[in-house]
Image: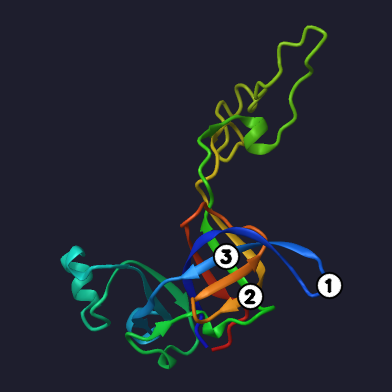
Amino acid sequence: MQPGIFAKKVGMTQIFDESGTISPVTILKAGLCKVSQVKTVSTDGYNAIQVAYGEEKMERLNKANQGHLKKVSDQGFTSFGEFHVTKPEDFKLGQTLDVSSFSKGQKVRLTGKSIGKGFAGNQKRHNFARGPMTHGSKNHRLPGSVGAGSTPGRVYPGKKMAGQMGNATVTLKNTEILYVNTTENILVVKGSVPGKKNAVLRIQQVNLKG
């Protein structure tokens, strides 16, 4: 059983199930994914497979990636990702990974980068409450106190303040697959997923035993 693949977000729509209940879904299309390296405890200190994705002409890659992919495929790839496995001997260089190992009703783990929303204040970024709007209040959307005075004399790291919102790695656990199309290499999952259109998502099998 393959541990997972990488796919692009096509977009969102809605479908009806057998009982007539409507569900929001996201369509994911997996491109060509190939095993580009098999890592073992004896050679690398851990068991994993490296998966190449993002098709590109081989001549447009740098020399390092061309040499790395020479034994794998004539097709070039721009990106690489890893999946930990318990039996690396079950995988071979150049092996193609697709959606055929996924099934309807299966739960998967999705990881992607959320949409960047730029600089945001406390209310929008952390859902803080605002100050009173009447009775002479001059604190409407101000952050308020951020720490004590002389001691410690600084703001502790991690304090929730205004700053960049989004553009962070987000993982969704136990996302349900509602439809699998092996011909078009498409997965339809329930609900929304991180990222905008054409964002690349890591789809990992849950409770992998192989």
Colour pattern of the rendering = rainbow
Crowdedness of circle 1 by 10 Å Cα count: few (<14), some, many (20+)?
few
- Residue 68 x/y as whole percent: 23, 75
* Camera-side mark, 1 or 2: 1
Q: Which mark is residue 79?
A: none
Three-letter amino acid code at the position of disc 3: Ile
Residue that mark 2 sits on: 179
Q: Nearer the viewer, residue 100 or 78?
A: 100
- Secondary structure beneath label 3: strand
- Secondary structure beneath label 1: loop
Mark sitting earlier along the chain (3/2): 3
Three-letter amino acid code at the position of disc 1: Ser
Q: Quadrant of the C terminus?
A: bottom right
Mark sitting earlier along the chain (3/1): 1
- Residue 64 x/y as whole percent: 19, 68
Q: Which mark is residue 27?
A: 3
Residue that mark 1 sits on: 19
Mark sitting earlier along the chain (1/2): 1
The picture quadrant where one finds residue 11 is: bottom right
* Camera-side mark, 3 or 1: 1
Q: CA distance from mark 3 to mark 2?
A: 9 Å
Q: Is residue 171 above or below residue 103?
A: above
State the residue at coordinates (49%, 76%).
185
State the residue at coordinates (70%, 36%).
127
- Residue 112 x/y as whole percent: 52, 59
**Labelled pair 3, 2 in contact (Cβ < 8 Å):** no
Three-letter amino acid code at the position of disc 2: Tyr
Q: Nearer the viewer, residue 25 or 140?
A: 25
Q: Nearer the viewer, residue 66 or 154?
A: 66
Q: Is residue 194 above or below residue 142?
A: below
